Amino acid sequence: MTTTAITVHQTARPDGFPTPDLFRLVESPVPAPEPGTALVENLFLSVDPYHRELMDEDGGWALDAPLEGRTLARVVASRDPQLREGDLVFHRHGWRTHALVTLGEHGTRKITSYPGVPLHAHLGILGGTGLTAYVALTRFLELTELDDLFISAAAGGVGSAAARIARLLGVRRLVGSAGTPVKVRHLTEHLGFDAAFNYHDGPLPDLLAKAAPDGISTYLDNVGGDHLEAAIGALRDHGRIAWVGAIAQYHSAATPPPAPRNLFDIVGKSLRLEGVRVRDFTPVQQELEDLLVPHLRSGTVTSDATIVRGIEHTVGAFLGMLRGENLGKMLVALEPAG
Ligand SMILES: NC(=O)c1ccc[n+]([C@@H]2O[C@H](COP(=O)([O-])OP(=O)(O)OC[C@H]3O[C@@H](n4cnc5c(N)ncnc54)[C@H](OP(=O)(O)O)[C@@H]3O)[C@@H](O)[C@H]2O)c1
């Protein structure tokens, strides 16, 4: 086993879209576990939109220090009788090759691996990404087979998972937006969308009206800004919005875009707009696994992911995800995928 651990540090704060020079790789000896802890080798790292917010002064990541991030790891040495060599764990000591973990701290928990299900699914459709999509659809939008659903950033992690889960739960019409022609084709050819559009191709209200001529009843918002305004415009009376993210504004925290100009239509149409926070729904995890694991095993559902290999490509994967280079969840693999 290697004796050198590699950790990604952030070294300066961004001004606008972040650049690779704001990070560096730091080498250190692989630590030995202390009583009550285990040494893990990280297998998959998650790079997420919320990391962009953590980069800011008031964001949460300290400079020149290890970074938080959702991670799937394997125990390689343990001084905790509940963790044995070879056990798989989820933890949040991300963006590094090795970590010392303690069960119950920083979300550290054992993971049940399912034969026939790729390990990376635990950071994708079976992880926080899938859970976000699932609770948005079931607890907020209360999706039924009569609903016409619009999903923004539809080819990304939450978007792809939401499409797969919506098709399982039943939905009448599925409409999605994404940022490239390749992604738009992917939505209709592989993810079960009835209609999709590239949001760069014109005014959003026009694009959405063309894709959803009868309007929509539900909207899962990953983007905010003008996507949210267009969706409010397209929603029919008593429509529902699950607001999951606002990736259109994460680089301009100091000068956020104005609120949707048609906000008062929420009253006129009696719409419901609610914010989704996945961390409030950890008890729903088993329900998600019960629903999805049989489908993942049989292949009727896949955990869509773009997987970049090597700790040295973590920052590139993160910046690539912010630029939209991912189909499905963007992940970094630190050894051949299981
Ligand atoms: N509330 C919660 O608890 C929770 C939990 C997880 C995630 N989220 C949020 O859910 C959203 C999706 O997260 P994810 O992890 O699945 O990321 P993702 O969708 O896999 O990746 C981000 C995607 O956003 C799109 N994008 C980037 N800039 C954009 C812009 N200006 N306008 C429109 N689209 C843009 C890009 O795709 P294109 O090529 O299509 O532009 C990119 O692939 C994010 O807003 C995230 O913060 C919230």
Image (cartoon, grey):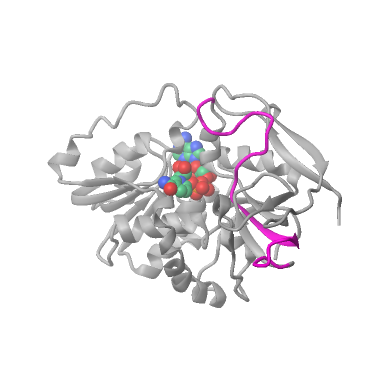
Q: Is residue 15 left or right of residue 312?
A: left
The x and y percentages for residue 95 are: 67, 44
Q: Is residue 294 left or right of residue 83?
A: left
Residue sitting at x 51%, y 61%: 125
The x and y percentages for residue 308 are: 69, 50
Can you tell which quarter of the image residue 208 is in?
top left
Question: Does residue 49 show up?
Answer: yes
Query: Looking at the rendering, in which quadrant would you find the C terminus?
Result: bottom right
Residue sitting at x 54%, y 66%: 302
Q: Is residue 86 magenta?
A: no
Question: Does residue 327 show up?
Answer: no
Residue sitting at x 40%, y 69%: 168
Residue placed most toward the observer, 273 or 12: 12
The x and y percentages for residue 37 are: 68, 56
Residue sitting at x 42%, y 62%: 283
Q: Is residue 64 magenta?
A: yes
Q: Is residue 161 left or right of residue 138?
A: right
Residue placed most toward the observer, 116 or 188: 116
Q: Examine the rendered structure and indicate whether residue 173 appears above or below residue 231.
A: below
Number of marks in picture: 0
Residue placed most toward the observer, 322 or 42: 42
Q: Examine the rendered structure and indicate whether residue 30 appears above or below residue 122.
A: above
Q: Residue furthest front?
A: 35
Q: Is residue 25 left or right of residue 141?
A: right
Query: Looking at the rendering, in which quadrant would you find the N terminus?
Result: bottom right
Q: Residue furthest left?
A: 268
The x and y percentages for residue 103 are: 60, 58
Residue placed most toward the observer, 130 or 171: 130
Q: Main secondary structure of the magenta part?
A: loop
Q: Which residues are magenta?
A: 57-84
Q: Examine the rendered structure and indicate whether residue 95 appears above or below residue 143.
A: above
